[in-house]
Image (spheres, rainbow, N blue to C red):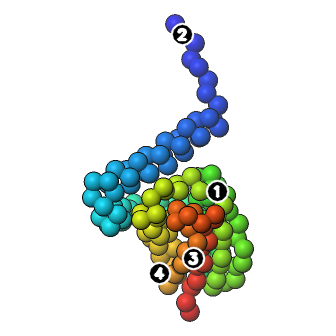
């Protein structure tokens, strides 16, 4: 009988994350090629909302990491966890109870096609609105759109 090969967890993680990001980008590219950018984003949004999958995932991380509240701090804590899970490198530049500005410098989900770069706005919108329906965000800079980093500005209107 052959001896079972031991694969380090770090390698398993890198494999899983590479497969996850490559799978999403491949799906986005294939739909874009077949149906165009607008339809790609429409279908992506439908997939993300189907069965409330992103809402459930957001709540799963909130519960797992015992994040409570619906303020900017909770939103930023959620993103810090997501970034760590996905290998995203970023920095929180400015933060108050109702405002935050973050910069992402390493993004494994960067798409090559600028016309579908708004896919992450769909995901981000669902996440922050799950935590606080009054939360809004802007993305003034985007690596997917050709910038050297992504910038996210999140606000909660009182």
- Whichever of callouts 1 and 3 sits on the residue coming sooner in the sequence is 1
Q: How far apart are the alpha carbons under marks 3 and 4?
A: 21 Å
Determine if residue 21 is in view. yes
- Whichever of callouts 3 and 4 sits on the residue coming sooner in the sequence is 4
Q: In percent of the image, x 57 and y 76: which residue is there?
A: 140
Local SS, label 4: loop
In the depicted structure, whether residue 55 falls above or below residue 108? below
Q: In percent of the image, x 70 and y 79: which residue is there?
A: 95
Q: How far apart are the alpha carbons under marks 4 and 1?
A: 28 Å
**Which residue in the structure is indicated by mark 2?**
2
Comparing 114 with 69, the one in front is 114
Q: How far apart are the alpha carbons under marks 1 and 2?
A: 40 Å
Local SS, label 2: loop
Comparing 43 with 32, the one in front is 32
Mark 3 vs mark 2: give the one in front: 3
**Which residue in the structure is indicated by mark 1?**
106
Q: How far apart are the alpha carbons under marks 1 and 3?
A: 17 Å
User: Residue 133's mark?
Assistant: 4
Q: Are marks 4 and 1 in contact (CB under 8 Å)?
A: no
């Amino acid at each position: 009988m052959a001896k079972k090969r031991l694969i380090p967890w770090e390698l398993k993680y890198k494999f899983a994350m590479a497969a996850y990001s490559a799978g999403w980008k491949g799906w986005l590219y294939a739909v874009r090629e077949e149906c165009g950018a607008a339809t790609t984003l429409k279908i992506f949004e439908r997939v993300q909302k189907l069965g409330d999958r992103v809402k459930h995932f957001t709540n799963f991380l909130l519960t797992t990491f015992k994040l409570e509240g619906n303020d900017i701090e909770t939103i930023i804590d959620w993103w810090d966890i997501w970034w760590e899970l996905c290998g995203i490198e970023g920095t929180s530049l400015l933060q108050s109870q109702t405002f935050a500005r973050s910069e992402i410098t390493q993004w494994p989900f960067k798409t090559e096609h600028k016309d579908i770069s708004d896919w992450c706005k769909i995901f981000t919108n669902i996440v922050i609105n799950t935590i606080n329906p009054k939360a809004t965000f802007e993305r003034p800079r985007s690596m997917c759109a050709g910038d050297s980093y992504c910038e996210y500005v999140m606000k909660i209107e009182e």
